[in-house]
Image: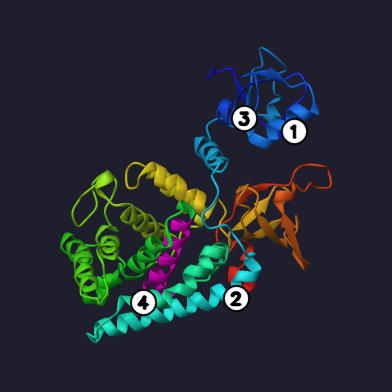
Amino acid sequence: MSNSLQKIRVEHLKFGMYVSRLDRPWLETDFLFQGFHVQSIDDIRRLREYCDYVYVDPVKGKPVPRKLLVNTQHAYEDKLARIFREPRGAERYPTVTSMEEEFKIARQGYDNTLDLVTNIMEDVKARRKIKIKAVRRQLQQMIASILRNPDAFLWLKQLKERDNYAYAHCVDASGLAIAFGRHLGLPQEELEHLAIGTLLFDIGKLQLPVELLHKRGRLTEREYALIKRHVQIGVELVREMEGSNPHIVSVVLHHHERHDGRGYPRGVGGPQIPVNGRIAALVDCYDAITSDRPYRPALSSCEAIKLLYDCRDKDFQSDMVEQFIQCIGPYPPGTLVELNTGEVGLVLSQNRTRRLRPRIMLILGPDKRPYTRQVILNLLDDPKDSQGRLIEIKRPLPPGSHGIDVRDYYL
């Protein structure tokens, strides 16, 4: 790309500007010519159907005013924009309920799964036999809910209790794995194996010293070696369960392996890690870094997405990372965001055709004072402010910004 090209948002284009490059391949659009002068409102409208940004050649047409230039160094944001415009085929599991309709059912399924984990842990401690068939049966409610609409589960994940990380992590990782498997179109039997495997993948930690698991400082070499043993212990425990199978065991065995071979316990990488292991590793990492831990506070969902993106083709397969980001969205339900109007809102649900434009519950006005009534804004409708500007998300906000506690707004 020529260094002279100027990056501009599509809605800021003016007649006479020469569009030399899009933020996606020309072949993914219906434009006949790869480069043209903007001559009508219809040109801008058609560009908006495909692009957020375009690159203008100031030599061939009108230059972009300095105030409208967009920083061309934001490669990560450009990449995200491309990820969320990539066309997908027909979904194996279409969304069939609204987030509001699904929420109460999802809440019950989540709580029941948390009870299930508690009972499994107690059974393991008491050396009682665990039947995989019973685990599968009790997981069905959460699986069915996520298959209908994963947004309700993603909302619930934001409400995690701070003092119950170990058990909630198992439930959240299992739910994320189901949501990701749903997005990838895995058959239901594979989703069940994945759900069970992620629910049980940390079961080996029950045989490690509690003080080691909750240590605040840096682990010694000996302590880290001991922590790593939880995988093999977990594999042995799951193998002994009545009705277990290699697919479930594989999830437990591979959830700490890494794409570049630097994981454990076997140090395998790339295609040597089965797909269910790659999924388990991703959801395990994402949930861990978005949860408060003794040694560090939680990252926001958006910070976690950026970190995972930076880890592609190192810790995790690049394509898998991009699909996971597409699955949970750039602004998962429960994310606080600030709009370009100055208003602050809470993401309620995603629009799967345009992930960058979710449904939002407005909480604070431009003056950062609370609204006295509930206002729901669907960015998919392309709402405009009083000056006729398109309303869009300016930036995600850290949890707790402006004193807002997401738990005060759950449905």
Secondary element type, mark 2: helix
The amino acid beneath tag 3 is Thr
Residue 39 vs residue 187: left or right?
right
Q: Mark 4 points at which residue?
A: 135
Badge nearest the viewer, 1 or 4: 4
Q: Magenta region's main secondary structure? A: helix
- Residue at (54, 18) in percent of width and height: 3
Q: Name the residue under label 2.
A: 104
Observer able to see residue 158 = no
Horizontal side, residue 127 vs residue 332: left or right: left
Extreme residue in the left direction: 222
Instruction: Determine whether 6 is above or below 115 in the image.
Output: above
Residue depicted at 62% across the width and 59% down the height: 349
Badge 2 density bin: few <14, some 14–19, many ≥20, Cα 10 Å:
some
Residues rendered magenta in the picture: 162-182
Residue at label 1? Answer: 45
